[in-house]
Structure formats: structure tokens, C-alpha cells
Image (cartoon, rainbow, N blue to C red):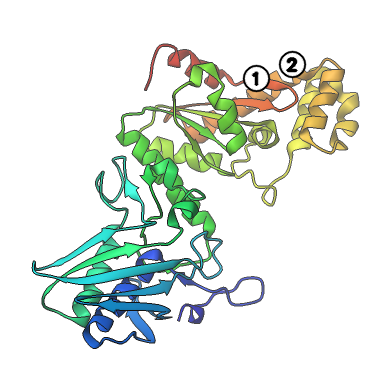
Amino acid sequence: MADDFFGEKGGRTPRTGYTTGVAAALAAGAAVRMLQSGERPRTYSLATPAGPVIEAEILEGETGSGWASCGVVKVAGDDPDVTDGIGIHARVERTSAGGVEIEGGEGVGRVTRPGLDQPVGAAAINRVPRALIEREVRRAEPEGGFSVRLSIPGGEEIAARTFNPALGIVGGLSILGTSGLVEPMSLRALLVSLRLEMRMLRAEGWRSLAAVPGNQGREFFRGFSRGAGRPAVKYGNFPGEVLDAAGELGFGEVLLVGHAGKMIKLAGGIMDTHSRTADARLDLLALHAALAGGGALAGEMLGAATVEAGLDLLSRHHLLETAMASLLGRIDFHLRRRTGGALLAGAVLFSPGHGLLGATAGAEEILARWEGRND
């Protein structure tokens, strides 16, 4: 069972789960057994591509003339995965043709953009899960033809909270998994998804990339006239990762657009902006206030409750523009150092109370290049 895998986390054993691909293969294998016997198996087990054996309870089962359907609950373990607890169903039917045909039904997404594991128009069921499903069907019955139709009740609604819409997967969730196991490492999943989205944009011909920490940055960028019509990827707390990936994938330019609350950290060379890693926002703001001639404000700046309050303080003392110019210069320095000349990078900062705060020299160069250009 997934509960048997282990590692240390907070003084206890974190639970490792299994992928949607494994859940689908469990359901398909159980459905073939039910087709053979007419009775729903109580449990079904399989060896994952990574090696460990997963055993799951078969919660639902139906059968008819030449077909059977079984359901399995997908378990994510301690990973904060929105697919945890969903039901994945496989309807297996005998066919006159040889081979095992695998298709997606209700709640399984469909590919609409190039660059993914499956071609445009296909169900979002990746190669490894397809091979695993076929293996389990053949393990139960080596001969004959079968069609396997997967469904995920409620999958379309759940998919709206995943990366699928940004990747061009519509209508539901993906059937994924390489190792078959879901380790409690959401960071790894985020970075894999980020690189995949960037790879797809590059495959579509984009040489310039816009990247934002989150929804506020995306909304601001959409209203930014020189960025109109350009896609923007979300990188969360990892601007350094998006810069590294952009260089590896052959992008020529990366424009980071974000709320000052996160972006100010770049002025200190902080490329993981999660507050658990580093929270020097007000320290950096106080430093650049002092460099702008507001040394007497440093103590008050450090005592501000938020970055917005610190910006208000600078504005009241007519130092906002000068301090931001100093801070943006330092961000520009750290972006150039991180990219090492592999590409041009720039940053645009804003805040709800002050709107556009400014752009680095690299950002101004990128925006100038974007004039009249759509790549």
C-alpha cells in the first residue's frame, strides 16, 4: 500500500501516494477480472514502474454483456494534490479488433496544443499510463481485443484548479505519472509543470517570455499595453528557476512582472521569494531609501507593517521615485548575473496603491523590442 513507503517529515512518516495513471491501471485491471468472473474484485494490486506494489480497494463495479466497469480512489498521500480522493473509473469492453484501445471519457482532458506527451486532439492520457493500463489488461487476459474508456466524475471542475487550462488541456484532468508514485514534494511538481508550459510556448515559436509570480501580476500584465496578447507563465516563488529554464530552452528575453512585495527581494539577489526562505523586503526598501537620501527614515521603514506602507512613507517624503530607481538598478544587476548573458532579463514592479513603480533597464530594452513585434 502507499502507506508503506516512508521518509522523515515533521517527526513522522509522510505518506507516498500513487498517480492518476496507476489509479486508472488499477481500475482497468480490476474491470477485466470482473469481466472474466462476473464479480467485482475486492482489491487489485500492481507493480508500479518505480517498483513498489500498490494495492487498492475496488469501490465500484458494474457489468453487462461483454463489458465491465470498476472504480478506484486516487490517493495523493501527503502531497497537496487537488486530485487526492477523486474516483477514476475504467470501462473495459471486448472488441473484435485485436489490441487494447484506450480513450478518455467524462472528466478526462483533451489536448488542444502541441508540445505535450500526446498529440493535439488526443485524450490527455500519457504514454507511461497507457502502457501500464495495457499491461494490466493483458496480465488478466493475454489474448483478444479490448477498449478501455476512462472517466473521472467531476474532473472538469477539478481541472480548473490545475495547470491544465494553461497547458491547453480542456474538459478535464490528465492521466499522468512516470514512476507511478506521488511523493510529498509539491515543489518538484510545480517546477516540472512550469518547464513544461515554457517548453510548449517555445515549441509554438515564442522567443520572448513574460513571467509573473501569481494572479495579481498576470492581471497587471494583461493591462500593460506593450504586453497585450502575449502569454505569461506563473512561477510562484521561483524567479530564478524560470530564468534558468528560459536560457536552457532557448528564449531570448524574459520579462518578470510582479507585485513589489515579492519583486523587491530580487534586489538582494533572492531568487526563491518564499517568506520561509528570505523575507528582506523592508530591509531592502530601507537600504534604498537611505541611498536616496532618506537615511533618517530607515528605522521607521523597518517598522512598517507592509511593503505598501513603506512605499507610502517614501511617497510622503518625495523619495519614492529616487528610491525605486536605486532598487531597480540593483534588481537589474542580479538578473544579469543570474542569466550570465544567456538571455536578456528585466523586471517591472507595481503595487496596488501606487500602480507602476518602474522597470529595470533590461525591461525597458525588452519592451522597446516588443514594439511592433509579436514573438
Amino acid type for the residue under numbered disc 1 = Gly
Please give left or right for residue 62 compared with residue 298 in the image. left
Please give left or right for residue 330 compared with residue 103 in the image. right
On screen, residue 22 above or below 171: below
Question: Farthest front residue?
Answer: 65
Q: Residue at x 36, y 60 (%)?
A: 176
Can residue 201 be seen from the camera position used here? yes
Question: Farthest left residue?
Answer: 97
Can residue 48 be seen from the camera position used here? no
Q: Residue at x 50, y 72 (%)?
A: 16
Q: Are marks 2 and 1 in contact (CB under 8 Å)?
A: yes
Q: Which residue is mark 1?
A: 358
The numbered dot on residue 321 is 2
State which quarter of the image contains the C terminus: top left
State which quarter of the image contains the N terminus: bottom left
Dot 2: element: helix
Q: Residue at x 59, y 77 (%)?
A: 13
User: Where is residue 281 drawn, in percent x and y?
Assistant: 74, 37
Foreground of the two, 16 or 291: 16
Q: Residues within 10 Å of mark 1 (few under 14, many from 20)?
A: some
On screen, residue 52 above or below 158: below
Q: Residue at x 30, y 42 (%)?
A: 115
On screen, residue 121 above or below 79: above
Foreground of the two, 189 or 285: 189
Q: CA distance from mark 2 to mark 1?
A: 8 Å
User: Where is residue 46 drawn, in percent x and y?
Assistant: 33, 79
Residue 54 sits in quarter: bottom left
Amino acid type for the residue under numbered disc 2 = Glu
Residue 282 sits in quarter: top right
Foreground of the two, 201 or 68: 68
Residue 285 sits in quarter: top right
Dot placed on the residue nearer the N-terminal end, 2 or 1: 2
